[in-house]
């Protein structure tokens, strides 16, 4: 009944009305003339039925045509939404269809507003984070410069040291700005991935060699059992180097003293899975879902003390996704962390 076309309902009403009118007419004629004739009944029925049909015709023109037009307009508006809800199953009831379209449109708008609100919060947070992160090195530089101006410049025991510290803070600022630039380029799709065929083993050995000194300072050993076997992949060599450096630096920064960072490659069909695991401090489960967000730090004090901004993993994820590949993390607090990402075999 609910899905019945209103036109059918009106037609049925017309027939019922015509029948009632013809019964009433025949009743009056019977009272006046004293006898009953079918001609009058049929005539009464015909007149009222034609009247109802004319009414139906005008209702169709003025109301249903407008409803149909409205339905088309709402449908067009809805299709322009960024994320339209899935298509609606129409039935014969135009009013129900319009109602479903409007409800779906309202739902789309609601989702859109929620998305924009989230973006606004994200934007505010982002600006807050950027200024907060830049403030620390700027205040440091200001402190060193003021001390030097207040006579420290002539004091041989601190002048060089303070200048070196100021330079370190400048480097920190440059690193943050470089990271931000990389993220915004990756997000806007400006940074093009330039894939090529290269040997992942030799790239890995390269990175490990460069990071070895930092690791040994902390007594951490970097192990790479498959270091003699070449593994060819099709990816952007420079960007993948950035990913590996970020993950290995993290494993050392958040690794335990005299711990171990292990690198493994796994053959998974068309892809190679790269696994970087450590037996460091680990990450609590609550942090895992947000770990790849910009500025997100699981252990804020430790990360800051390590000079971390929380941008590294966000860049890593963007790079891997730009390759249409995936990155995952598994971690147990106090036991260690495993990052794994895939690359296309070549
Ligand atoms: P940046 O890389 O920008 O210098 P960061 O190292 O703090 O700073 P990410 O690399 O994005 O930022 O890492 C985010 C957070 O995830 C870190 O602050 C740290 O708390 C946690 N984390 C990352 N890697 C590990 C790891 N191997 N073990 C334990 N915690 C980790
Ligand atoms: Mg990092």
Image (tube, grey):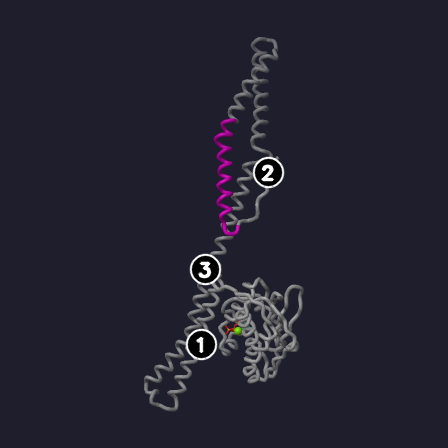
Label 1 vs label 2: CA separation?
63 Å
Residue 120 has which mark? 3
Residue 172 has which mark? 1
Q: Earlier in the sequence, mark 3 or mark 2?
A: 2
Q: Nearer the viewer, residue 271 or 254?
A: 271
CB contact under 8 Å: marks 3 and 2 = no
Label 1 vs label 3: CA separation?
28 Å
Q: Position of residue 288 (x, y in %)?
A: 58, 68
Mark 1 or mark 3, whichever is nearer to me: 1
Label 3 residue SS? helix
Name which residue lies at 58% across and 70% down: 198
Name which residue lies at 59% across and 38% down: 91
Residue 45 highlighted magenta (yes or no): no
Residue 60 highlighted magenta (yes or no): yes
Q: Position of residue 272 (x, y in %)?
A: 63, 68
Q: Quadrant of the N terminus?
A: top right
Instruction: Report whether the residue tagged 2 is closer than 8 Å to ligand 1.
Output: no
Residue 17 figure quarter: top right
Q: Is residue 299 left or right of residue 120?
A: right
Q: Position of residue 268 (x, y in %)?
A: 66, 66
Q: Nearer the viewer, residue 289 or 315?
A: 315
Q: Earlier in the sequence, mark 1 or mark 3?
A: 3
Q: Which residues are magenta?
A: 57-83
Dot 1 crowding, Cα within 10 Å, few <14, some 14–19, many 20+: many
User: Magenta residues: mostly which secondary structure?
Assistant: helix
């Amino acid at each position: 009944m609910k899905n019945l076309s209103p036109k059918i309902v009106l037609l049925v009403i017309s027939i019922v009305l015509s029948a009632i009118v013809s019964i009433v007419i025949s009743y009056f004629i019977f009272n006046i003339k004293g006898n009953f004739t079918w001609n009058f009944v049929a005539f009464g029925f015909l007149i009222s039925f034609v009247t109802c049909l004319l009414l139906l015709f005008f209702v169709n023109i003025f109301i249903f045509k407008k409803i149909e037009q409205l339905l088309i307009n709402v449908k067009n508006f809805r299709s322009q939404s960024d994320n339209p809800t899935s298509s609606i199953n129409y039935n014969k009831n135009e009013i129900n269809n319009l109602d479903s379209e409007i409800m779906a449109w309202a739902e789309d708008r609601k989702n859109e507003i929620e998305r924009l609100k989230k973006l606004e919060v994200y934007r505010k947070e982002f600006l807050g984070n950027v200024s907060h992160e830049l403030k620390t090195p700027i205040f440091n530089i200001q402190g060193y410069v003021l001390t030097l101006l207040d006579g420290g410049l002539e004091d041989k025991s601190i002048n060089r040291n303070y200048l070196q510290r100021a330079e370190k803070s400048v480097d920190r600022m440059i690193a943050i700005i470089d990271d931000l630039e990389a993220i915004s380029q990756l997000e806007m799709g400006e940074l093009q991935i330039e894939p090529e065929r290269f040997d992942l083993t030799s790239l890995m050995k390269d990175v490990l060699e460069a990071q070895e000194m930092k690791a040994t300072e902390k007594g951490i050993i970097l192990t790479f059992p498959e270091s003699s076997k070449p593994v060819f992949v099709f990816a952007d060599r420079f960007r993948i180097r950035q990913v590996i450096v970020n993950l290995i630096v993290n494993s050392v920064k958040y690794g335990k003293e005299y711990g171990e960072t292990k690198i493994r490659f796994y053959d998974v069909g068309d892809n190679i899975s790269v696994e970087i695991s450590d037996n460091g401090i680990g990450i609590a489960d609550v942090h895992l879902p947000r770990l790849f967000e910009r500025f997100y730090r699981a252990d804020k004090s430790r990360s800051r003390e390590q000079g971390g901004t929380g941008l590294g993993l966000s860049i890593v994820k963007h790079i891997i996704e730009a390759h249409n590949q995936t990155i995952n993390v598994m971690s147990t607090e106090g036991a260690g962390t495993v990052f794994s990402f895939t690359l296309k075999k070549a």
